Every structure is written in C-alpha cells, then in structure tokens.
Image: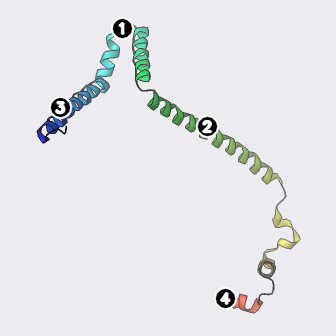
Amino acid sequence: MSKSVDELERDVEASRGRLDGTLAELQSRLNPTNLTEELTRTRDPAGAAALTAGRLSDTVRANPLPVLLICAGFGFLAFATVQQAAERRRLRVLSEEALKAPSDATLSGNHPDRLEEKLDEALEETFPGSDPVSVRITR
C-alpha cells in the first residue's frame, strides 16, 4: 500500500524535473527579447494583435479565477481613485466656502488676551466643582 522511500524520491525527482521544464519554458516565453521577436515575426500588425488576443483568451480560459481576482483588484483601485477625486473636489469646494466666510478671530470674545480665561471656563464646565487652584498648580 505505501510506497517505499526510493519510489517516493523518484516521484519527487520526476516532479521537480517537470517543474523545472515548465519554469524554463515560461521564462523563455516571457523573455522580453523573445516576446518582441515573436511579435515582429508577424509583419502584419493585425496578425500580431490577433496572436496576442488569442493567447490572452487562452490564458483567461485556462486560469479564470486569477484573472477574476486581478480584474477585481483593478476595479477596487479605480473605485478608490474615483472616491478620492470626489473627496478632493468636495474639500476644495468646502475650503473655498470657508475662505469666503468671516473669520472667528474678528469676534469680540475671541481676543488672544482672553485665551487663558476661556480655557479655565471650559475646564470648569467640563469638570464642574473642580478646584481651580489645584488645576492651576498641576498645569
């Protein structure tokens, strides 16, 4: 029932040999010089396009799941780009409106000299009943 160690080693070596052959074939096919040579062999641009389209369709048929995942990734990238562009446009419009609005610095209660007083008031509102002396000491 179980294979001997020698048989298993032979199977592993055979698998490695097939894998090496497949990798070598892929490397030779995907080599940029071989790709350009193959495309320039067909003098007709339409023939080269048809050859490339045929290979692409064969690859898609042979590997539908990876192609689907790649397309989904591109879709997410496009969606994120559109969303970011819309957000930038929205922020640009908001910032232009904010520039037109009057500044809070011109209000009478927002004078820089009253900053400490306003901070103390905010602290008292946030923590009612707190001792203002200990608050000033711990700062």
Q: Which mark is residue 14?
A: 3
Instruction: First in sequence, mark 4 or 3: give its number.
Output: 3
- Mark closer to the observer (2, 4): 2
* Residue picked out by circle 1: 43
Of 20 and 10, the residue lying toward us: 10
Percent coordinates x, y for residue 99 in the rendering? 78, 53
* Residue type beneath disc 2: Phe
| Amino acid type at mark 4 | Thr
Residue 40 position in % (x across, y down): 33, 14
Q: Quadrant of residue 62?
A: top left
Neighbor class of circle 1 (other Cα within 10 Å; few <14, some 14-19, many 20+) is few
Provide residue 122's location: percent of width, then percent of height.
79, 77
3D distance between C-alphas at marks 2 and 4: 51 Å
Residue corresponding to mark 2: 79
Q: Secondary structure at mark 3?
A: helix
Identify the mark nearer the N-term, 4 or 1. 1
Viewer-proximal residue among 40 and 78: 78
Which residue is painted at 52% across and 36% down in the image? Answer: 73
Left or right: where 67 falls relative to 75: left
Q: Are marks 4 and 1 in contact (CB under 8 Å)?
A: no
Compared with 131, 40 (above or below) is above
Q: Quadrant of residue 37?
A: top left
Mark 2 Cα-neighbour bin, 10 Å: few <14, some 14–19, many ≥20: few
The mark lying in front, picked from 2 and 3, is 3
* Residue that mark 4 sits on: 138
Spatial CA distance of label 2 from label 1 is 39 Å
Report whether 87 appears left or right of 115.
left
Tag 2 secondary structure: helix
